[in-house]
Amino acid sequence: MTEIRKITPIIFVEAIEPCLPFWVDRLGFEKTAEVPHGDRLGFVILTRDGTEVMLQTRASVADDVPSLAGTPMKGTILFIEVASADAIEAALAGIESVIPRRKTFYGADEIVVREPAGNTVIFAEFATTQPQR
């Protein structure tokens, strides 16, 4: 077996531009790379605190790897562990929750929203002890 060094989600979207305010303005990610596709963005890499999220458009995927262009959209669920659910809640003020903020049986204080492309994002704050995964 080889060492797994990193896992980075690629979120499949129709358009990147409407998603950037959510990730950059509200959550503080920085756009560290971008690839144009025609007169729009086709791909971006967003980073923050040593984490990375990539966004890629269906049109860009269709040109790059046509066999993946039919992948269903809006089915991604991102689980993001955070230091403060309160800080996330403040940053996302005005964005509708998928479910009310909750405490889970596995010890997480969770906030669940949909980002502008329709994918679900779960932000979870854990107490000092982590659950067994």
Image (cartoon, rainbow, N blue to C red):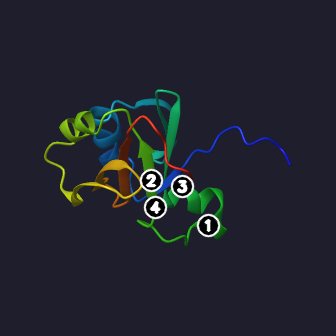
The residue at which mark 2 appears reads as: 78
The residue at which mark 3 appears reads as: 60
Query: Disc 4 versus disc 2: distance between alpha carbons?
Result: 6 Å
Query: Disc 4 versus disc 3: distance between alpha carbons?
Result: 18 Å
Of 93 and 44, the residue lying toward us: 93
Residue 65 x, y percent position in the rendering? 66, 61
Q: Amino acid at mark 1?
A: Leu
Of 54 and 96, the residue lying toward us: 96
Crowd rating for badge 2 (residues with CA inside 10 Å; few <14, some 14–19, many 20+): some
User: Of callouts 4 and 1, which one flags the residue occurring earlier in the amino acid sequence?
Assistant: 1
- Residue appearing at x 40%, y 59% in the figure: 14
Above or below, 16 against 97 in this view is above
Instruction: Find residue 76 and name its label.
Output: 4
Q: Amino acid at mark 3?
A: Ser
User: Of callouts 4 and 3, which one flags the residue occurring earlier in the amino acid sequence?
Assistant: 3
Query: Disc 1 versus disc 2: distance between alpha carbons?
Result: 20 Å
Q: Amino acid at mark 2?
A: Leu
The residue at which mark 1 appears reads as: 68
- Asked whether the residues under the numbered discs 4 and 2 touch, taking CB atoms below 8 Å apart as contact, a structural biologist would say yes
Residue 7: quarter of image: top right
User: Of callouts 3 and 1, which one flags the residue occurring earlier in the amino acid sequence?
Assistant: 3
- Residue appearing at x 39%, y 32% in the figure: 29
Query: Disc 4 versus disc 1: distance between alpha carbons?
Result: 15 Å
In this view, the residue farthest toward the right is: 1
Question: Which structural element holds mark 4?
Answer: loop
Above or below, 103 against 27 in this view is below
